[in-house]
Amino acid sequence: MLAYRDVDLLPSSSLKGGAGEECLLLVHIRKVVGRVTYRACDECAEGVITDVVLDEPFRDCGLGTRALSHLRSKYPDVTWRTTLDRRLTRDLLRRMRIPRAAAAGNCSHGRPGVVAPAGT
């Protein structure tokens, strides 16, 4: 899909409003076509992906891989895990080698703090 190049990845606060959650919005021509919701701890460098949503036309064009790769480059020192086990995201997360986290989805010392991106 040619729209792959036309999708912008924009950081945002979580739409769900969870404590410490951030959101990476995937925007195509001023329309949100997907999002990755996550938390990252600044003390232990552990991150948890709590939700991945992509609109139907964008599911099989590599956009999910691009979004998760973007998170890895934005937070290079963070070890990522996920709480997701849905059919639509399971294969993506397995391909990206992101293992399942504990059910709570917090880091090893229980803090859901957010890592500041490098260079800010």
Image (cartoon, rainbow, N blue to C red):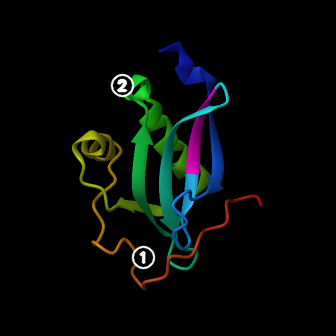
* Residue 15, above or below 58: below
- Label 2 environment density (alpha carbons within 10 Å; few <14, some 14–19, many ≥20): few
Residue 107 visible in the displayed image: yes
Quarter of the figure that contains the C terminus: bottom right
Disc 1 to disc 2, C-alpha distance:
31 Å
Identify residue type, mark 1. Answer: Cys
What's the residue at 51%, 69% (across, down)? 18
**Residue 54 locus on image (x, y percent):** 43, 36
**Residue 29 locus on image (x, y percent):** 65, 24
**Residue 12 locus on image (x, y percent):** 64, 53
What's the residue at 34%, 53% (across, down)? 98
Identify residue type, mark 2. Answer: Asp
Question: Does dot 1 land on a helix, a strand or a loop?
Answer: loop
* Residue 73, above or below 83: above
Which quarter of the figure has residue 55?
top left
Check residue 107 in the rendering and tell me which mark sits there, or answer none: 1
Q: Earlier in the sequence, mark 1 or mark 2?
A: 2
* Residue 27, above or below 6: below
Report the span colored magenta. 24-28
Asked whether 83 falls inside the magenta stretch, the response is: no
